[in-house]
Image (cartoon, rainbow, N blue to C red):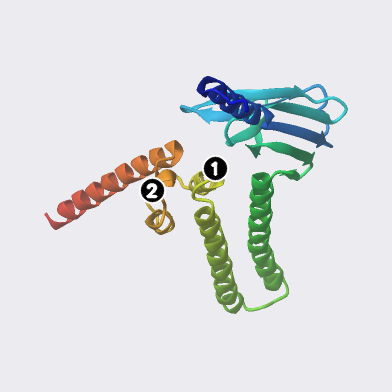
Amino acid sequence: MNRIGANSLWSLLLLAVLLTSCSRKYRVEGNSSLINLDGKVLYLKMLQDGDWVSVDSSEVVHGCFKMKGPVDSVRMVTLYLNNEPLMPLVLENGRVKVDLAPGSFVARGTPLNDLLYDFIERRNDLERALEELERKEARMVLDGANIDDIHADLVNQEQDKLNEMNDYVRQFIVDNYENVLGPSVFMMMCSTMPYPMMTEQVEDIMRTAPVVFKENPLVRDFLDKAKENMKLLEEHKRLQENMASN
């Protein structure tokens, strides 16, 4: 009976790992109906040490573009046209189909991209509902309704919709604490702030966040700046109170 020696066994194991690694590839296939995009180059860029680094690129030919390559780990990237960010993408094993149309950028076909764009679609629906409340108020005023009565009612509806949106975003982050979507959506949420700060929503998310989420470089940098800003605000408030009391 033949026996496999230790060196041969390790060689087989190493080969198996290499074959598995090589088989993991991303493939981005895109279609565009945007005007004047043909002949332009699109880039996949990843934020690395504060700089946007190009990962891959493709020229748009007859409204189509393709990119592919090995993927040793799941990465969050952004599709760029020159220096203009178009949409987020997850580079993971599999084929993702990108559709660029006026007012609608969508990427689907792999698990995390499907999850991300389900989230974006639902969040956009909630934002449109908020915008519709504003238009509804304007229409009711034009129709002669009492502005005080309708304003009070619509303010309550708006707050309910805002609470629904905040709860939805928070739960999505919580559900994705340990993959690239959690930190990425957290940073998207925080990008709407005038400057990094520890809001009630941020503190609520951090309360149950695992170490892997808190140690994400982008999240950690945001938290450090937010805590520093909060200290400065507290010091400024104390200074104003001391000046007022003197």
Q: Earlier in the sequence, mark 2 or mark 1?
A: 1
Of the 4 image quadrants, the one containing the C terminus is: bottom left
Give the left or right position of residue 166, taking residue 23 as reference. Answer: left
Give the left or right position of residue 180, taking residue 118 as reference. Answer: left
Compared to residue 172, the image places residue 195 above or below, namely above
Q: Secondary structure beneath disc 1?
A: loop
Q: Residues within 10 Å of mark 2 (few under 14, many from 20)?
A: many
Q: Residues within 10 Å of mark 1 (few under 14, many from 20)?
A: some
Q: Position of residue 72 (x, y in %)?
A: 59, 30
Q: Nearer the viewer, mark 2 or mark 1?
A: 1
Give the left or right position of residue 194, taking residue 17 as reference. Answer: left
- Which corner quadrant of the image does residue 158 belong to? bottom right
- Which corner quadrant of the image does residue 188 belong to? top right
Give the left or right position of residue 14, taking residue 98 as reference. Answer: left
Residue furthest out toward the right: 62
Mark 1 residue type: Val
Residue drawn at x 79%, y 34% is 30
Residue furthest out toward the front: 1
Q: Position of residue 96 (x, y in %)?
A: 74, 39
State the residue position of label 1: 180
State the residue position of label 2: 197
Residue drawn at x 53%, y 24% is 10
> How many numbered marks appear?
2
Residue drawn at x 54%, y 22% is 5
Q: Secondary structure beneath disc 2?
A: loop
Do residues under tags 2 and 1 come within 8 Å of each other at their CB atoms? no
Of the 4 image quadrants, the one containing the N terminus is: top right
Using the image as rendered, state which of residue 114 and residue 143 is in the foreground.
114
Q: Which mark is residue 54?
A: none
Mark 2 residue type: Met
